[in-house]
Amino acid sequence: MAKKRKLNSIRLLEARKIPHEIHRYDPRIRDAQEVAAAVGMPADSVYKTLVAEVPSRKKPILVLLPCNRTLNLKRLAKALGAKKVALAAHTDAEKLTGLQVGGISALALLQKRWGVYLDRRALEQSHIVISAGERGIQVRLETKALIDLVSCEIIDVADASETR
């Protein structure tokens, strides 16, 4: 049996002694709500990470929101004090982050020092599940620990999803 390599995000959590659980799923699953089902977690506790570009800023930002919600770009722009914000296309997000869509993680991108914005609904959860930095691997940790570790700014930018 091949040994599973440990991701830097998991090493970081271990080094900081942050309790966490690793959840694996079929990496061919691309839909965030299907990921939630695959790891056996409620959709409102599994967070997707989106890459957004703000013309007035040099660096992209990361926005984390529940997988059963959609991003409200107008509210995001207002929260950032920007006139316009755009989601990065999948190929652009992968080029910018060096990670595959479905595996983009604030934990894996700490060294980039990008702004990280967490939807306020996370405060209703004691723990949330986010990508560990590779498609097929999610990590569950205390919401407060994530906020402290990646210096998340809390904002209200999620709308009810139009699908499902």
Image (cartoon, rainbow, N blue to C red):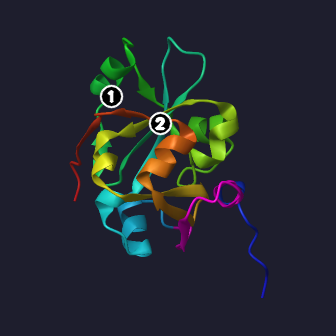
Amino acid, disc 2: Cys
Of the residues under marks 1 and 2, which one precedes in the sequence?
1
Per the rendered image, the range of residues in magenta is 11-28
The total of numbered circles placed on residues is 2
Disc 1 designates what residue? Answer: 73
Dot 1: few (<14), some (14–19), or many (≥20) neighbours within 10 Å?
A: some
The residue at the point 27 percent across, 51 percent down is: 124
Residue occupying the point 21% across, 48% down: 162
Please provide percent x and percent y for residue 56.
Answer: 50, 11
Dot 2: few (<14), some (14–19), or many (≥20) neighbours within 10 Å? some
Q: Which image quarter holds the N terminus?
A: bottom right
Residue at the right extreme, as displayed: 2
Q: Amino acid at mark 1?
A: Leu
Answer above or below: position of 102 versus 54. Answer: below
Q: In the picture provided, is 84 more to the left or to the right than 146? A: left
Residue 8 relative to residue 62: left or right: right
Residue 1 or residue 163, whichever sits in front: 1
The residue closer to the viewer here, 16 or 9, is 16
**Which residue, given by chain and number where applicable, does mark 2 sit on?**
152
Q: Secondary structure at mark 1?
A: helix
From the top left corner, tell me how far across and down residue 40 is, in percent: 38, 75
**In which quadrant is the C terminus drawn?**
bottom left
Residue 51 is left or right of residue 109, and the answer is left
Per the image, is 21 magenta?
yes
Q: Which of the 4 image quadrants contains residue 35?
A: bottom left
Residue 6: quadrant of the picture: bottom right
Kindly report the distance in space between the C-alpha atoms of the residues bearing marks 1 and 2. 18 Å
Seen in the picture, residue 119 relative to 54 is either above or below; the reply is below
Residue located 42% across and 74% down the image: 38
Q: Residue at x 38, y 66 (%)?
A: 36
37 is higher (above) or lower (below) than 47:
below
- Quick check: 141 above or below 23? above
